[in-house]
Every structure is written in C-alpha cells, then in structure tokens.
Amino acid sequence: MKVNEDLSILFWLKREKATKEGLVPIYVRITVKGTRDNFSSGKKIHPDAWDEKTAIAGMSCPECKLINSYIAKTRVELEKHYNQLAAVHKRVAASMVKEAYMPKQTLQKTLMQAFKLHNGEFAERVNKNKASNGTLIRYERLKDKVQDFLRKKYKLADIALEDIEMAFAVNFFHFMTMENIGDNTAMKYVKTLKQIIERAINEGWIKHNTISGFKCTYKDPDRETLEMHELVGMYKKEISVERLAEVRDVYVFCCFTGYAYETVYNLEPANIFKGLDGKLWITKDRQKTGVEETVPLLPIALAIIEKYKNHPYCLSENKLLPVNSNVRYNAYIKEVATICGIKKELTTHTARHTFATTVLLENDVPIETVAKLLGHRDMRSTQIYAKITKRKISNNMMALESKIFGEKGLLKMS
C-alpha cells in the first residue's frame, strides 16, 4: 500500500513458512525510493482468511480484530518513523525505517512475561512463609488456562500486553464457561487476570489496563453445611477403617474450629496455649490472609487432639493431627459421608462453613466474633455465612415466644 510518493508499506503472507496446522506468517515489507526491507509481524493466519486486496484479515479469521489492530498500529508507527527520519536525513532507506521501528517492538512486553513477573515475586513470598503455596498454585493454574485460551482462540503462544483489548476478557470468560468451569470460578479467574496486568502497569510496561472495565459479578452459591444432629452423628459413628476414622475426626475438628484444610494440615502441638480464661486455645496465621486465627478449643476438638497425641505420624512429623493430602482427604470424606448416611457434598470447605453457620451463628454468636474466629480481614467475607437458616429462625422465635407468652400460651402481662 502506497503511503506517499516515497513510502510504501505492504503486509503479505510468506506461504513457504506455513506451519503443520496450515497457518502462514504475516510479513511486513517497507519500500522507500526503491529500497526494500522485510520483517515478521509475529502473527499467523490461515490463507483462506486473508484478503489479498485489502491486506487485512477477513471476518472468518477467529483473531481478525487482533491482527487488523496490529496492522493498523504498525502502519501508523512506520509512517511516523519515516517522517521523523525524513525530517533530518536527505536520504532515507527502508532499512533505516525498520531499525527505527524494531527497537520499540523488541521492548514490547507480553502477557506471559507479566505472569512470570507476578508469579515469580509471589513464589519468593511463599518461600519466606509470607504467602500461601495454594494461592501460588492458583496463579500458575490461571497462567495455564490463559495459554490454553491463546492457543485455541487466537492460535498464539503469547500476546503483547498492548494488543489486549476488552474483548480478550469477554472471550476468556466465555472460553472457561464452555470448558465446564462455573461462572463464579470463571469470574474469579478474570479478576485475577486483571491483577496480573495491573502488576505490569506498576512495572511501567504498559499505561492502561484495557480489561479493567470488565465487571466481575458473582452469584451467591448455596453453601453446603451439616446440621448439628448430622455433625454429632458423624462424630459418634463407629468406623472400623482407620484411614476413614482419622479423616472423620479431622473433619469434625475443623467443624468445631473453623480451620481450613491448609491451616489444620500445618498445625503443631506448639499452636495450643492457655488463654486468659484458663482454658486451652489454638492459634495459627491463615496463609491466605496472614491474619491470626485464634479459636477456643471446644470439648469435642480437645477430645480429638487427645486421641491423636501419640499417633506415630503426629510424633514423627510434629503434627497435631494425622491429616492426609488434600486429594485423599476430599476423597475419603465422601466415603465417610456415605457411611454416616449424609447425602451432602462434603469437602474441605464444608467444615469451615459448618463452623460459621451451624456452630456459631445458629447459636447466636455475634457476626463480629465469627469474623474474628474465622480470621477474616473484611466483614464482607463473613457476610456470606450470615444467611438466616430455618434453625436460626426457630431459635429466635422460641426465645421470642418465651418472652411474650407464659404457660399454656397465655400472654404475659407487663
């Protein structure tokens, strides 16, 4: 395409370099007064999706917006560099325009580089016990999902941060939901992706987060919890298989302390201390938030600790309880649910939910205290447990009835 009398810029397909998938690289040719120079755009396209006349990607190309945006930006940048060179040089060659343009391109940072920066720093925090390894695993899982998305949607291994547009977030969310990932989980992935890009902005790699306007909305899920009779029944159930009895006891312990799996896995005897009330308490910083989670030990939790104080694993590893790997724990607790006749989906999370709802809120423990016991920084995190349950309504109405009415349902006289 002729830009002016002296400058032409052409985008063309180098068909001899086609990939096994049939994709062909797009090259850029600069022509200045008879001199020529070429370079690869780094973009690939199927030849059938390329419009030879207009030298742009057709609508049949899945990444047409991305490619055409690059073509438009590159054309403008090359013309700008030519004009700057022509203003100070009597003679401008195509190689001079290319050299002026290419340094900027080599400095362009990519999304995978942003992940490397962010996740690398977080890994350093994990090594210093200042962050959770579980969270790092989630960051790495997000990186893998983004790479999978780039390959399947755009046929790319990476993407320049400057080429990311709002459509990227919209398409990524859709991609994940089509991969059988729940809407809430997919939203959380997009929210975390925003954080990765924000880190790149803080590093000075780009100026704006083009997906910051993507609104992450969540549907409040129904959180599975055990009712008190189910919890007590599970605790008292005779289980002859040792591995299942141990998992049952750890699960019940979590139901009466609110500790998440990762926290209870790392508990040691040294985490127990005598409180100002003369009773035994247990404390541990939550790796997820770094907030201290200190809980008084209720009788059942104390009994479970006593039961395993001489357990071979606990003695050799200096652990408070014999906790399995997360995968085994979640598998075994499902077996326990079947043995106990509980038709609910029990996981490492349901014990924490049971503590917050069944053990605390249904017994009129103030939500401020619940937040403190759960190690929440923000009260909004605790509000998710504050749904009014039938048991809570029943308890409140019984208390109200006893205040207003006497025996035989007679109204108390003031």
Image (cartoon, helix red, strand yellow):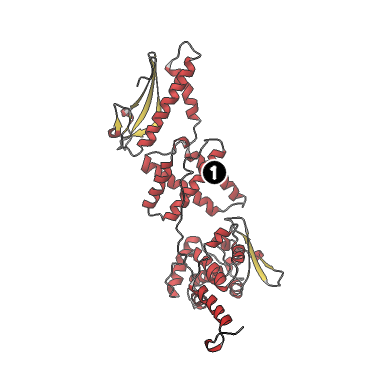
Image quadrant for the C terminus?
bottom right
Residue 220 visible within the image: yes
* Closer to the camera in the image, 283 or 376: 376
Left or right of 337? Residue 24 is: left
Query: How many other residues sit within 10 Å of disc 1, few (<14), some (14-19) or many (≥20)?
Result: some
Would you place residue 344 above or below residue 238 in this image?
above
Would you place residue 273 above or below residue 63 in this image?
below
Residue 41 visible within the image: no
Task: Give the residue drawn at x 43%, y 25%.
Answer: 76
* Dot 1 amino acid type: His
Residue annotated with mark 1: 118
* Closer to the camera in the image, 312 or 300: 300
Where residue 57 sits, quadrant-wise, is top left
Task: Give the residue drawn at x 50%, y 61%.
Answer: 326
Image quadrant for the N terminus?
top left
Task: Give the residue drawn at x 54%, y 75%.
Answer: 396
Where residue 95 sits, quadrant-wise, is top left
Would you place residue 262 above or below residue 117 in this image?
below
Residue 81 location (% of width, % of height): 47, 21
